[in-house]
Image (spheres, helix red, strand yellow):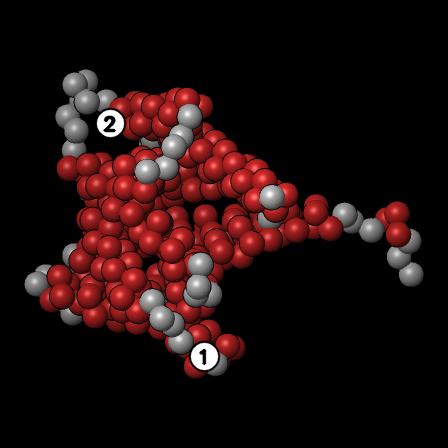
Amino acid sequence: MTRPENRRPVWLSHNLQGMGWMLVTTVLIVTMHTMIRHLAEDGLHPFEIGFFRTFFGAPVVVVLLLKYGWGILKTDQLKVHGIRSFGHVAAMMLFFLGLSMTPLATANALAFTAPLFATVLAVIALGETIRWRRWAALIFGFAGTLVIIRPGFVDVGTGPILVLVSSAIWAVILIVIKTLGKRDSTPTIVTYMVLLMSPIALVPALFVWVWPTWEQLGILLVMGVMGTTAHLTLTQALRLGDAAVVMPMDFFKLIWAAAFGVLIFGEFPTLYTWIGGFMIFASATYIALRERALARTRAAANKDV
């Protein structure tokens, strides 16, 4: 019989689980990015890769249906799911295209800007008020993008620009997902993501279609399952652990991307990529934690009223 004083604290157990799920998420995402880059160099257009990324998410949906039943298809937000899916496809296609012409570590570092764009969007579109600390974090984060791409010092490639545009679109989708999450469960959101994104993604893919080989199909299948699974592991990480503990693990995406870039593509990230990537990541993490703390304060104040 385990003595009470030797039991691990519940909060520590949950945080460790959250950190573990977040670490799994970073591995899944960066591995998927590596497969995308490999397939693009192997002759498949990023638009076609994007279609198979969504289409091969179907096995995950089958598992969700078997576990939760057909009830997960019930929603009164079908139009919002459609908007989310269309925007998600646009962001995904642009990111995949940018990834095909950008070093792996650079693309992942610039992708950290999505929460920064989301904060700016919340101010412009939703009228949210942010104070000087978050403004300072925003400026610091966007300065990190300038450190990475160094406009005026080196030629700014099309790839990094596409990744940044993709992040800006994804920021809009993050707000839409928050709206969906108020009434729909994670399995419902993921299921409609796959069901609606596949036909939307097929349209641009048809213009560049080349039949993949069996080997490429195998990689596409694994990639699709990984990408969809990453959505579930990320949700699980944030559900189990405190954001202050879980979010810093996201920086491992840059570490994995740098390692895969060197080992597979012979890409050595520059010092500017590391510095800029850390600036963007630190800014995004601070803003996320600050917003979470303010939300808790507001909730406590409303409870006391």
In the image, residue 253 lies at what x, y percent?
43, 42
- Foreground pick, 158 / 85: 85
Image side of residue 215 versus residue 183, left or right: left
Question: Up-down: is 88 above or below 221?
Answer: above
Q: Residue furthest front?
A: 305
Identify the residue position indicated by label 1 in the image.
71
Q: Identify which residue is drawn at 19% across, 18% down.
A: 153
Q: Position of residue 166 (x, y in %)?
A: 24, 45
Query: Does residue 100 appear in the picture of this structure?
Result: no
Left or right of 9 in this view: 276: left
Residue matched to label 2: 149
On the question of residue 157 being in view, the answer is: yes
Quick one: 154 or 240, which is closer to the camera?
Answer: 240
Mark 2 vs mark 1: give the one in front: 1
Amino acid type, callout 1: Gly
In the rendered view of the protein, which quadrant contains the N terminus? bottom right
Q: Quadrant of residue 103?
A: top left
Q: Residues within 10 Å of mark 1 (few under 14, many from 20)?
A: few
Say which residue appears at 35% left-offset and 61% top-offset.
223
Task: Give coordinates of residue 155: x percent, y percent.
Answer: 15, 26
Name the kind of residue labelled 2 in the image: Ile
Q: Residue at x 42, y 26 (%)?
A: 131
In primary-sequence order, the first of circles 2 and 1 is 1
Q: Position of residue 62 (x, y in %)?
A: 42, 77
Instruction: Classify 75 as above or below 231.
Output: below
- Measured Cα–Cα span from mark 2 to mark 1: 47 Å
